[in-house]
Image (cartoon, rainbow, N blue to C red):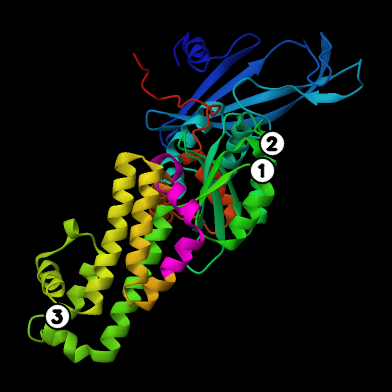
Amino acid sequence: MSVGVEALFTSALGLRDPWFVESVGLDTAKGRIDFHVDCKPMRLACPECGSEHEPVHDRIRRSWRHLDFFQFEAWLHCDVPRVGCTSCGKTTQAGVPWAREGSGFTLAYEALALALCSEMPVLRASRLLRCRDNRLWRLVRHWVAKARAQETFEEVRVVGVDETSLRRGHATVTVVHYLEARRLLFATPGRDGGTLVAFARDLRAHGGDPSSVRHICMDMSAAYLSGAALALPGALVSHDPYHVAALASQAMDTVRREERAQDAAGMRRVLGGGDPRLMRQLAWGMRRNPAGWSRSQTEAMHWLQRSNLRSARAWRLRMGLRDVYREAARHRDEEAAAASLRAWLSWATRSRLEPFRRLAQTLRAKFDAVVRGMMPDRNNAYVEALNGLLQNVKRAARGFRTSDNFIPIAYLRMGRLENLPRNPIATAGP
């Protein structure tokens, strides 16, 4: 190495007196570069009590993984001083400016790792960074917990509650989003009423007031309703349109299955003279919106609409409820939305379709909460979109087997945390 390289890397690493790069070792065969950092002073401030000019007791060898230099894996090594304090009587290791205590990575490396983990599966990030994925999980958990501890929730007024599963058939996690800011506030294992009590406790811990929450959007779960009444007593409940639409789809499917079981041959005759393929296309066409129909589904649905089948009435009821929600979102008029919903409930009650009669009874019993959920600022459309994104991430990534991993990565990607380390290679803005 030529003269001055150590000073160059001292500046490149952002080191300040008394820390400096003493030597640089390059091993091209191993693809590795080693920076040896030193601290010459024999007296330092005590890390424990702050007493100045205390003697260095001894030095301990430490190493940290740093950002790669070109194609070379980079490491920092230092004989870190331990200060023997005459004031407090303790011998304490001095902190280093390039890494947090207990970490085997430099701060720059950790910041890049967080940026990668927020955009790609942790396992893939670990391969790019050439480290073990369990070390990245520990890193994510540390920084997310530290960043969340500095967040404030004092402005939270409208929240949405939903659940997402870790894996099919396995435990669920309750997520609470701040709908106005479109960010994840809280996540915890389970889906009982106690999850909302835990949310209220977390809200207080971050400067929020559960009694100030005006609206809470959720499904019709009795557990969530009881938890909301206990933990958020001042909040008006809004039932999420997504779950109301799902109930309407279930009622429609029940009618179709019952009709097919009773007279499958008769349905085939009505649908294009008995072509069995139309039966399959009918099932898919009824579940999809018209804009997504294939040619064969369009043909099956045209046959259906010209028929006197109960399935046709069920499909029209489902689409009618969809139109009620669409008009409510467009006009943002709660009274008009209530009138439209009453008309639909009357239609469903007179339909002579038992699944829709039961659905009408359910919605009538929760009428006010259902109407409130029709307003665009009080529904979980944003929550459902993000939960769909999380499902895709879970299918693409390993390491989501437990909530200990899932919840931190959810906060990292959806929590809009403001106090995370800045990506060291991010392009500076204008």
Q: Which disc is residue 305 wearing?
A: none
Q: Is residue 242 above or below residue 36?
A: below
Query: Circle 1 — which element?
Result: helix
Distance from label 2 to label 3 (Cα)? 58 Å
Q: Amino acid at mark 1?
A: Ala
Q: Amino acid at mark 3?
A: Arg
Q: Which residue is mark 3?
A: 277
In the rendered structure, the answer to whether residue 23 lies left or right of residue 353 reads: right
Residue 207, located in which quarter of the rendered image?
top right
Residue 376: say if magenta: yes
Q: Earlier in the sequence, mark 2 or mark 3?
A: 2
Q: Foreground residue, 113 or 182? A: 182
User: Is the C-beta separation of discs 2 and 1 under 8 Å?
Assistant: yes
Amino acid type, residue under disc 2 in the picture: Arg
Q: Which mark is residue 204?
A: 2
**Residue 388 drawn at (x, y percent):** 39, 52
Is residue 132 visible from the viewing direction of this image? no
Does the CB distance between marks 1 and 3 fall below 8 Å?
A: no
* Secondary structure category for the residue under label 3: helix
Please tell me which of labels 1 and 3 falls first in the chain: 1
| Residue drawn at the location 26% of the way across and 85% of the way down | 260
Residue under label 1: 200
In the image, the segment drawn in magenta is: 359-379
Is residue 15 placed above or below 284 in the rendered structure?
Answer: above
